[in-house]
Amino acid sequence: MEKINKLIKSFRDKGLKITPQRLAIFKILENNNSHPSAEQIYHNLKRGYPTISLATVYKTLEILEEMGEVKLLKINYDRKRYDPDCSPHHHLICVGCRKIVDIFEDYSNALKVPSQIKDEFTITDFRVEFFGLCKKCKNKRKFKEK
Ligand SMILES: [Zn+2]
Ligand SMILES: [Zn+2]
C-alpha cells in the first residue's frame, strides 16, 4: 500500500471523498500485517467512529483493491481478508485462530511444474499457503485432549 498522503491524493484524483472514516481505514491498514477482514476493521473503528458502517469499510476496501493498494486473499473457508502488502509473498494460516502470517521466501526454484503444463500454459504468478496450528492453538488442543 502507498503512503497515506499518496492514497489521499489518488482518491481525490478520482473524485472520491476523503472522510474521517476513510482516513481511519487507511490508518488501520498502514503497516498492518494481520491481514484483517472488513469486519475486523469495522469493529476496531466502531468505538472511535460510531457513525461508520460496514458498507463504508467494504466500499473503501473495494476501491483500494481496484487501485491495487490492497490484495484480497481468498482462503477457502475464511472471510475475505485484506493484505496492504502487495509485494510478492506467501502465507502461513492457522486453522485454529485463522491468524495469517507472512512468509517472504522465494519458492520459485523449489516448485516444479510438469513440462507438458509449461508447454500449454504460461505461469505468471503463484502463491504458497501453509496450513497448520500456531503455538497458542496447539497448546489449547493439548489441554483439550487431556
Ligand atoms: Zn492459532
Ligand atoms: Zn501477507
Image (cartoon, rainbow, N blue to C red):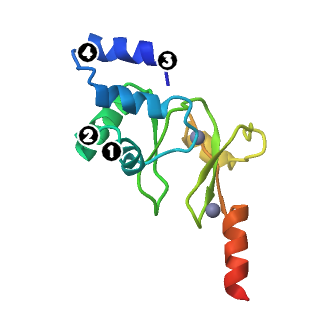
Q: Secondary structure at mark 4?
A: loop
Calculate the distance from the C-alpha at mark 3 to the C-alpha at mark 4.
Answer: 17 Å
Discs 2, 1 touching: Cβ within 8 Å: yes
Q: Give residue 130's position: percent from left, percent from top.
A: 66, 56
Q: Upstream in the sequence, badge 4 or badge 2?
A: 4
The residue tagged 3 is 3
The three-letter amino acid code for the residue at tag 4 is Lys
Q: Is residue 103 above or below residue 29?
A: below
The three-letter amino acid code for the residue at tag 3 is Lys
Which quadrant of the figure shows ligand 2? top right
Q: Residues within 10 Å of mark 2 (few under 14, many from 20)?
A: some
Mark 1 within 8 Å of ligand 1, using the beta carbon:
no
Q: Residues within 10 Å of mark 4 (few under 14, many from 20)?
A: few
Q: Upstream in the sequence, badge 2 or badge 1?
A: 1
The residue tagged 1 is 46
Q: Secondary structure at mark 2?
A: loop
Q: Secondary structure at mark 1?
A: helix
Q: Upstream in the sequence, badge 3 or badge 4?
A: 3
Discs 3, 1 touching: Cβ within 8 Å: no
The residue tagged 4 is 14
Which residue is depicted at the point 55% across and 59% down? 98
The three-letter amino acid code for the residue at tag 2 is Ile
Q: Nearest the camera: 77 or 133?
A: 133
